[in-house]
Amino acid sequence: MSRPVVVRFAPSPTGPLHIGGVRTCLYNYLFARQHGGKLLFRIEDTDSQRFVPGAEDYIIESFKWLGIQFDEGVSFGGDHGPYRQSERREIYKKYVQVLLDAGKAYYAFDTKEELDAARAETPNFQYDASTRGKMRNSISLGMEKAQELIAAGEPYVVRFLIEPGEDVLVNDLIRGEVKINSSILDDKVLYKSADELPTYHMANIVDDHLMEVTHVIRGEEWLPSSPLHVLLYRAFGWEAPQFAHLPLLLAPEGNGKLSKRDGDKYGFPVFPLQWNFNDKETGESKSYSGYREEGYRPEAVVNFLALLGWNPGNDQDIMTMEEMIQLFDLSKCSKNGAHFDIKRLMWFNHHYLQECDERILCDELKKQVLENGADPKSDEYIKTVIGLMKERINLPKELWGQCNFFFAAPEKYEEKSLKKWWKPEAPNYVASLCDFLEAQEDWNGESLEPKVLEWIASKEWKTGAVMNAFRVALVGEARGPQIFLITDQLGKEESLRRARVAIERLA
């Protein structure tokens, strides 16, 4: 295909954007950028009953946060607008008429009750060459009668006329050649008079052609509709775009598609941003969590999603967007579904948290300190603590849990740590160490450490037993960075006070 590459992402504004949709858009973005092409943003809102206010803005804000940029479309402008399908009614009507005039489509007047009766009478009923003659349509009734019904205001749909017995080939960039016989396809509805809007199949074909889309990269679930789309392109005499159907995103376990229920079960979001909504049944205000609000870095989410179904062909895991663009290759996408591994996403997020602007973590820790009624002391102190502790977190919300002892003395002591380190001799160890430290004029961990170790050796005590009991007294449990880094920050007075309070409380 010699035309410039044009791809599109075309979600329906029916609620929050699923993380699987994010990956689909990301792959379109990488493909477009690699080939110097364009990524269009189109809104498929022909199903007015499922439209949810705010969903469109939510989708745009999600990609803004993720750093995925569109070249034209809804809210971005361009030469192929309008980009909302609900604003393109007259365009679709024109092309529906083209198919009707060419005998490639026909009017159908069957009511819901009539269709239900046909399904009940015929097992595995589908509206096709073998059944259309028994139904109420312009083929069985004749065009003159059909026009009379239309003039009388009878509701109708327009169906695509599919000829049976034809092998339809779909050349997929990921799955190779897919062959389907047209006999298994039904005469899909293309247009409904009730709302004067096309169905998904008709609107997509017309829009992709008029917007000069060269490649349709979408989820595996749309693969069964591709032969129909090939036939529609052929009916119009248009060149079909190149198709690529991406593997499904699977739940962490099993072969089911990743769902909101899986996120709830395993404790992770399935939407990029938090989604606030009113429960239809109870009227209560509710929300679904989002990766942004949970503290995930957008770079981590993008990097993780890129490798869910695609392998760059090397051992590289951490990649910038520019590196992904350079390496991306649809032929290296898997045909099989990819399991959503939250532990791997945490690994990515841990990496990008270490690289992010430290002020982000400092501001977050300061906020958490204040929320817990503690004194943040100073910005410099906060920065020092972040430097000591950020390696230990995967998400910013873990900061207080990891750093709280720098700002507040322990109110209780972890039982597991006490059982291991607060032996009967521990009070004597800590009390003696406090007396020794009280006599030291230079309160600096670098110089204190060798003195303390020498002192412990002179007592013929075990270093681990003494220092871990001291750690439990200062922190409340056996965790945290090197003990003299802790005493440096707490200072002499606070360190000795905490140690002596622990001796009293644990007596």
Image: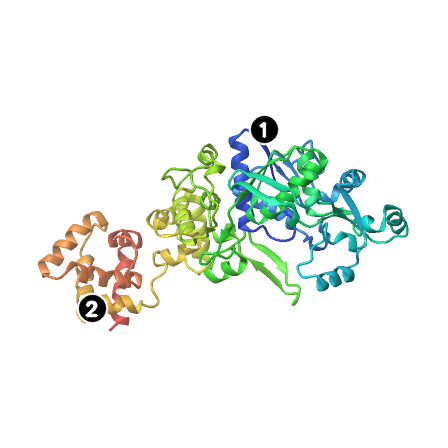
Query: Which residue is rendered at x = 57% and y = 43% of the image?
Result: 179
Q: Residue 149's spot in the image, x, y percent?
A: 88, 51
What is the total number of numbered labels drawn onto the structure image? 2
Image quadrant occupied by the C terminus: bottom left
Report whether 423 appears left or right of 474: left
Q: Earlier in the sequence, mark 2 or mark 1?
A: 1
Query: Could you tell me residue 494's position as x and y percent?
Result: 29, 59
Give yes or no for contact between labels 2 and 1 (Cβ–Cβ under 8 Å): no
| Mark 2 Cα-neighbour bin, 10 Å: few <14, some 14–19, many ≥20 | many
Name the spot of residue 303 as percent of width and height, x first.
45, 43
Relative to 79, say whether 121 is above or below.
below
User: Can residue 36 be seen from the camera position used here?
Assistant: yes
Which dot marks residue 487? none
Residue type at mark 1 is Met
**Depth check: 504 or 248 in front?**
248
Seen in the picture, residue 500 relative to 97 is either above or below; the reply is below
**Residue at mark 1:** 1
Give the residue drawn at x 33%, y 68%.
412
Question: Which is in the foreground here, disc 2 or disc 1?
Answer: 1
Describe residue 17's horizontal placement relative to residue 349 as left or right. right
In the picture, measured across the screen, residue 317 lies left or right of residue 61, that is left
Please name whichever residue, 53 or 417, is drawn nearer the observer in this view of the structure: 53
Q: Amino acid at mark 2?
A: Pro
Does any portion of residue 501 appear in the rendered image?
no
Between the C-alphas of marks 2 and 1, the distance is 80 Å
Classify the position of the N terminus by image quarter: top right
Instruction: Classify mark 1: helix, strand or loop.
Output: loop
The image position of residue 239, as x and y in percent, is 65, 32
Q: Which mark is residue 427?
A: 2
Q: Residues within 10 Å of mark 1 (few under 14, many from 20)?
A: few
Classify mark 2: helix, strand or loop. Answer: helix
Residue situated furthest bottom in the rendering: 507
